């Protein structure tokens, strides 16, 4: 039994402590009443949640009859807010113990009134402040309101009362402990027992202050605040294959969303996809902090999960719900079922695939575009690549694989018969027209329809967007077939040369090209720094120099891809069937034959030839004959993309793994439509199940030993200070 603290000098008769000392019995009864009030908190919460769970079955039928607009999120039926229950129960025990001890100390006479009152107030204030800090200031926001605190300033403003309660509990509890400590300062020098208690109390308070500072700093690293959270909260990915990094196209799409967006994650915490989705949501919020994320595990928050299922008519209980608010204030939603997030076998330790990023971007693209699908017409009938051919037997076989992937990417694909004699205009629903490898001359009627589509005479009509994939198509005389599109694209300041690019190496038809690093348009910038693309059998493109007396052309042409190899030949028609033998013949005897050397030097490209060119045009009408209008900073509208090769978009090229060709084609379409989703897109990423090779006892030690050692170190340091200062 601890020895009582020696009697101290008499206190003044004024103040709250002497008043409590004179009424010890009444004070004890008041403490017991307060204990009963605090005990009602956990009792009421248990009754509330259990009663609500019992009533759920009775009200389920009525809830089913509600419409989606009438359905409102109901209170959780499961037991929640456990820290609040523990806090109420702990305060009830503290006040009850203090009241009983204070009442018994008067009857036994072991403590005088002044010291007993001071010790009672010190104990209640210290323990109450400690429990409030731990349970309400730390545990409650961590277990219940974590999404609010990492949601940034917008989330804090919306849920200001949660932030206020947490800050009040954290700093109010510490302030209560500090004020309680000051009550005994007057007798610190005269009472050794009280001095020891105060020094130990001070050590605990100092440790809690340090802990609170560390926790606040760690929470701030999750919040994108200027000059702090924007740096520390930036996600890092140190994996060799960038498993946890968003693709550039995903970042562009997320950054463009300026409307309210909320995502509900309906997955259990034990699901293999839960941590993957959690990482994905963190990366998305780092790009767009306005995006809200709420985790609703169906096993822990069953009521909210069921309410969301009723409100949004979900057909499955697990997955990711995306709710997007349109500019008109209408909520639109899309749902990603759990099985669409990837493939995983919970019982297998092998790898699994995760494609949540790709699925999420598809839903966001669908919602931001008003659940409409852009229509892309592919020209057919003039020898173009067949839209219905999915064979990969040859490099120039069909567009069937491209068609399937575009339709999965929310595009509507249709055929356009340019050779149809009744065709007088391009369909009005055409967002983009694609002509891939035309092999026969187009009729003048088809060319006029394309001109009217690209440059409509009506002021209200929208200007067309066009993708032309030229290719090396020769006739019997080995001269390049003139389709009429060569002259057509000259109207947009692009020249398609009658030649073929050859590289001096074993496979001369392959051309290695990189995105133009000096281009100003976003499409070229999105692919700058990416791996080189390989094109086969390429016609070179060029941007003709403006002539002094030529009519003013408002179009701006820029090279998109450039052939980067040094030894590149430009072969003029008639082209050779065997380019390898042709090059060998040129190189043979070149060192001794000056004529062959001059011939070869004349064929070498003087500058990197363009493989692809983009064309933009000011979106606002320009003054007629003003050649400097575009220098005034007018916004450029994408109009046209031209390639000297079409095989890269054919089945064999598109189906090649990690080639980036489909991403390139989709980015071209998105760029022409002025959609932000440009650049390398999300790939299906492989993960592995890692199992820790340790016994259950070892896992428990790994979980609890570090925390125990940290607490032991803090207690040891505080105890050492206490022992030193008590002397």
Image: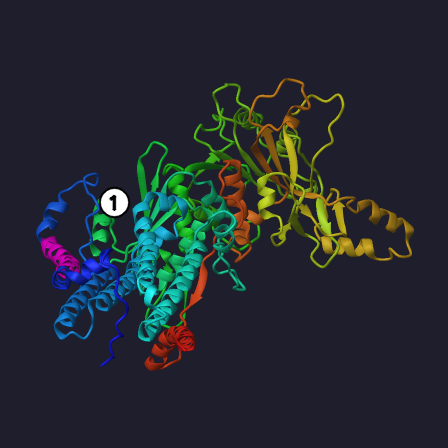
**For residue 434, side relative to residue 589 (left or right):** left
**In the rendered structure, which segment of residues is drawn in magenta?**
33-57
Q: Quadrant of residue 30?
A: bottom left
**Does the magenta-highlighted stretch encompass residue 44?**
yes
Any part of residue 525 in sight: yes
Q: Quadrant of residue 370?
A: top left
Q: Looking at the picture, how far across and down is residue 463, in whole percent? A: 52, 27
Q: Determine the main secondary structure of the stretch shown in magenta.
A: helix
Q: Quadrant of residue 643?
A: top right
Crowd rating for badge 1 (residues with CA inside 10 Å; few <14, some 14–19, many 20+): some
Q: Residue at x 23, y 56 (%)?
A: 16
Nearer to the camera, 469 or 342: 342
Q: Looking at the picture, how far across and down is residue 545, in whole percent? A: 74, 31
> Which element carries disc 1, helix, strand or loop?
loop
**For residue 267, side relative to residue 499 (left or right):** left
**Does the magenta-highlighted stretch encompass residue 382?**
no
Nearer to the camera, 134 or 240: 134
23 is higher (above) or lower (below) than 449:
below
Nearer to the camera, 266 or 354: 266
122 is higher (above) or lower (below) than 192:
above
The quadrant of the image that shows the C terminus is bottom left
Q: Residue at x 83, y 45 (%)?
A: 602
Q: What is the total number of numbered labels drawn onto the structure image?
A: 1
- Residue, disc 1: 312
Any part of residue 336 in sight: no
166 is higher (above) or lower (below) than 697:
above
Nearer to the camera, 682 or 422: 682
Q: Residue at x 54, y 53 (%)?
A: 652
């Amino acid at each position: 039994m601890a020895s009582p603290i020696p009697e101290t000098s008499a206190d003044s008769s004024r103040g709250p402590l002497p008043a409590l000392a004179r009424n010890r019995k009444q004070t004890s009864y008041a403490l017991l009443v307060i204990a009963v009030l605090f005990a009602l908190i956990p009792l009421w919460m248990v009754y509330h949640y259990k009663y609500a769970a019992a009533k759920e079955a009775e009200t389920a039928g009525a809830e089913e009859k509600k419409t989606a607009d009438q359905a409102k999120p109901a209170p959780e039926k499961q037991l929640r807010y456990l820290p609040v229950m523990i806090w109420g129960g702990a305060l009830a025990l503290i006040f009850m113990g203090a009241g009983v001890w204070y009442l018994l100390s008067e009857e036994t006479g072991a403590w005088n009134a002044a010291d007993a009152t001071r010790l009672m107030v010190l104990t209640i204030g210290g323990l109450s402040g400690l429990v409030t800090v731990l349970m309400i200031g730390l545990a409650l926001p961590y277990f219940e309101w974590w999404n609010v605190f990492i949601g940034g300033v917008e989330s804090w403003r919306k849920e200001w009362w949660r932030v206020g309660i947490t800050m009040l509990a954290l700093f109010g509890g510490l302030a209560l402990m500090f004020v309680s400590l000051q009550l005994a300062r007057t007798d610190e020098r005269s009472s050794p027992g009280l001095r020891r208690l105060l020094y130990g109390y001070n050590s605990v308070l100092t440790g809690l202050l340090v802990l609170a500072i560390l926790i606040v700093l760690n929470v701030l690293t999750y919040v994108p605040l200027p000059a702090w959270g924007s740096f520390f909260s930036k996600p890092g990915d140190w994996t060799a294959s960038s498993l946890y990094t968003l693709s550039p196209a995903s970042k562009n799409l997320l950054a463009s969303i300026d409307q309210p967006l909320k995502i509900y994650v309906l997955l259990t915490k034990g699901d293999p996809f839960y941590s993957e989705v959690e990482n994905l949501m963190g990366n998305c919020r780092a790009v767009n902090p306005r995006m809200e994320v709420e985790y609703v595990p169906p096993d822990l928050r069953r009521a909210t999960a069921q309410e969301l299922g009723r409100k949004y008519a979900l057909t499955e209980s697990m997955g990711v719900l995306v709710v997007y608010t349109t500019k008109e204030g209408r909520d639109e939603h899309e749902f990603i079922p759990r099985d669409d997030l990837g493939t995983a076998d919970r019982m297998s330790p092998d790898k699994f695939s995760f494609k949540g990023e790709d699925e999420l971007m598809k839903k966001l693209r669908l919602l931001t575009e008003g659940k409409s699908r852009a229509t892309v017409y592919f020209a057919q009938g003039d020898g173009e690549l067949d839209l219905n051919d999915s064979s990969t037997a040859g490099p120039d076989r069909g567009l069937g694989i491209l068609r399937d992937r575009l339709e999965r990417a929310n595009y509507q694909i249709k055929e356009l018969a340019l050779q149809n004699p009744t065709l007088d205009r391009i369909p009005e629903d055409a967002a983009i027209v694609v002509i891939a490898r035309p092999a026969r001359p187009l009729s003048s009627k088809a060319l006029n329809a394309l001109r009217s589509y690209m440059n409509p005479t009506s002021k209200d009509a929208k200007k067309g967007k066009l993708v032309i994939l030229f290719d090396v198509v020769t006739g019997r005389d080995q001269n390049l077939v003139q389709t009429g599109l060569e002259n057509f694209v000259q109207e947009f300041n692009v020249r398609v040369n009658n030649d073929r690019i050859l590289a001096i190496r074993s496979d001369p038809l392959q051309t290695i090209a990189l995105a133009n690093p000096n281009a100003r348009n976003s499409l070229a910038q999105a692919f700058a720094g990416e791996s080189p693309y390989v094109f086969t059998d390429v016609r070179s493109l060029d941007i003709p120099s403006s002539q002094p007396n030529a009519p003013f052309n408002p179009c701006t042409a820029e090279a998109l891809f450039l052939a980067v190899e040094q030894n590149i030949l430009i072969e003029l028609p008639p082209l050779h069937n065997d380019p390898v033998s042709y090059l060998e013949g040129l190189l043979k005897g070149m060192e001794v034959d000056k004529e062959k050397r001059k011939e070869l030097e004349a064929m070498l490209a003087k500058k990197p030839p363009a493989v692809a060119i983009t064309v933009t045009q000011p979106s606002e009408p320009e003054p007629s004959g003003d050649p400097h209008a575009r220098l005034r900073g007018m916004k450029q509208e994408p109009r046209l993309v031209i390639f000297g090769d079409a095989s890269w978009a054919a089945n064999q090229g598109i189906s090649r793994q990690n080639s980036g060709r489909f991403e390139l084609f989709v980015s071209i379409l998105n760029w022409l439509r002025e959609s932000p989703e440009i650049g390398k897109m999300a790939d299906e990423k492989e993960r592995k199940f890692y199992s820790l090779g340790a016994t259950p006892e070892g896992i428990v030690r790994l979980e609890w030993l570090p925390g125990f050692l940290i607490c032991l170190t803090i207690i040891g340091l505080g105890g050492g200070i206490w022992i030193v200062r008590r002397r």
